Image (cartoon, helix red, strand yellow):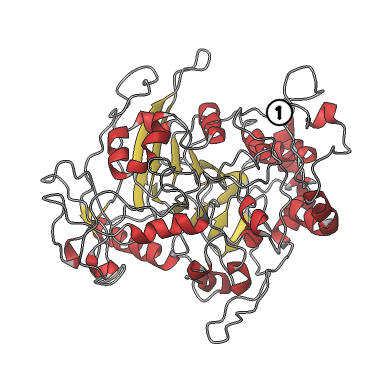
Amino acid sequence: MKIAVEGCCHGELDKIYETIEYLEQKEGVKVDLLLCCGDFQAVRNEGDLKCMAVPAKYRTMQTFYKYYSGEKKAPVFTIFIGGNHEASNHLQELPYGGWVAPNIYYLGYAGVIRYKGIRIGGLSGIFKSHDYRKGHHEFPPYNPETLRSAYHIRNIEVFKLKQIQMPIDIFMSHDWPRGIYYYGSTKELLRKKKFLRQEVESNSLGSPAAEELLAHLQPNYWFSAHLHVKFAAIMQHPPKGKSAPRVTKFLSLDKCLPHREFLQIVDIPERPGSSEGLEYDPEWLAILKATNTLQRTTPHPWNPPENNGLHERWDFSASEAAMMQVVEDLSGELGIPDNFSPTVQSYNPNKPHRQATPSYNTNPQTTELCAKLGLTDIYAQVGRGEDEVARVQGSTGGEDDEDEDSLGSTDEPSEYPTDTSGLSGSFNPDEITIEDEWEEEEELKAEVKGDELFDAKAGEIHTPSRMVLPEPKCSVSPPPVPDLMNLPPPSHSTPAHAQFGADRAGQGSGDDEDVTAARILKRTSIESGDAGSRGPTPRIKRRNQVIYTAAEDDECEG
């Protein structure tokens, strides 16, 4: 099976699908599936734009609304997770996943589904310790705090995923698992992103929650984005019991821009005899049912139950009987129904509505799934209790009414030492503002340095095609040292006109340490409108430049 993997989408669906079409024609292959690793930006109208955490000058409609309205249909079946630049009010309608447009499926806050027998899981958002223990309490219209906390990962979602016992083929997260950079070419990563050095050396870059999931799930493939750089790694896990050690192939990609490595085609072994469509995963649905009462819609800090003598139940993994009950609940039909229906009016470029306000709607897909399985529509629950949630948001905390002995506790310390109790609303002087992170991208202009770059016409620009990872080089888990893996250079080109036009064609490719083997094209003066160069080190605008000379916030690269 040919699977195209995309880094940060940023609403550029037309360009992504055009790139895939070109690759199919050039390579003589057919892409079966597109996976997008966050920052999808499923913006339907002007109201949705106000629910996306980006500066006003970057709030542009892009092209998703065309697919939502039916003007276009995705030519490749697409599955995506959320990142940290999303139309949160739209995605919150689908906490357990669902169709955002025909042929485009969202995995929800966390989710596992099957496509042609391939088991695909994902976790939306990014990790922030001060929101990690809260419930999903956000509701439009958002204030400046909830606009951002809406896309922060919660411990309940990680707890659900840690109940999975059956093997996962592919897993997606927006931010990287912490420590994964030790299992690839760390040297090359730091050459491309010099400002990450301090976090890499202190092992503070990435998500500790994703690190924990990587160790538990041990999927065959793990795809990420967020840091706007291509990076590949191989992690061989310690064996569990008497079973053979499993290997995870990790790949992170850039965002959809000219001369950037944002797309790869990966070959995944097919599963003969499997269903041809998209299916619910019985184990995952059984876990959702078992953990339904653990969900919270308040900002109170909460920890999931553990085997520490304080809880009546801590194991919520799915039994065979529970999975059979799910199949019965669905009347034996595991196929995900093609039941997309719009819940808001789509953007009309001929009749713009600039004063539109953010909308709140329950989604019929979520309503239907909750009715079948006995789940709670937590977005609808927040909507019904909006006044109560607002009152709680202004408080300093409190206790839930439910039995903490069986449903977790607010009094226990967080599982992560870096957690700040989940209630901190104080200003963090070390945190990069949204404006900072986006202005950084504006300042990453192209430079021509010695023999590393060459002048290329549009037809000569290269794009990575398919990823071929080497086998692990040792029989045990590699130590945290760099340069354990080198990837062969990509070997195909991007069209001169079909993808971005003559001035926006293609992406960078390969490793420019060996210039004769592969050259990397960075953003050119054609794109930037500036023929000058700035030198190899990106200039980053910060509130305190001294603090940020080497460090980068985990939310910096959107």
Horizontal and vertical percent position of residue 306: 72, 23
Q: Position of residue 469 (x, y in %)?
A: 31, 36
Q: Is residue 354 above or below residue 78?
A: below
Instruction: Compare residues 51 and 197 and report the one nearer the observer.
Output: 197
Q: Residue at x 32, y 39 (%)?
A: 189
Looking at the rendered structure, the kind of residue marked 1 is Ser
The answer to whether any part of residue 333 appears in the image is: yes
Give the residue furthest to the bottom: 350
Q: Residue furthest top?
A: 242
Residue drawn at point x = 51 percent, y = 56 percent: 434
Q: Quadrant of residue 322?
A: top right
- For mark 1, give the secondary structure: loop
- Report x, y in % for residue 277: 54, 52
Give left or right: position of 478 versus 311: left
Residue at 64 percent of width and 47 percent of height: 334
Name the residue rendered at 74%, 18% in the picture. 308
**Is residue 46 found left or right of 133 in the rendered image?**
left
Q: Residues within 10 Å of mark 1 (few under 14, many from 20)?
A: few
- The residue identified by callout 1 is 319
The one nearer the camera, 495 or 299, is 299
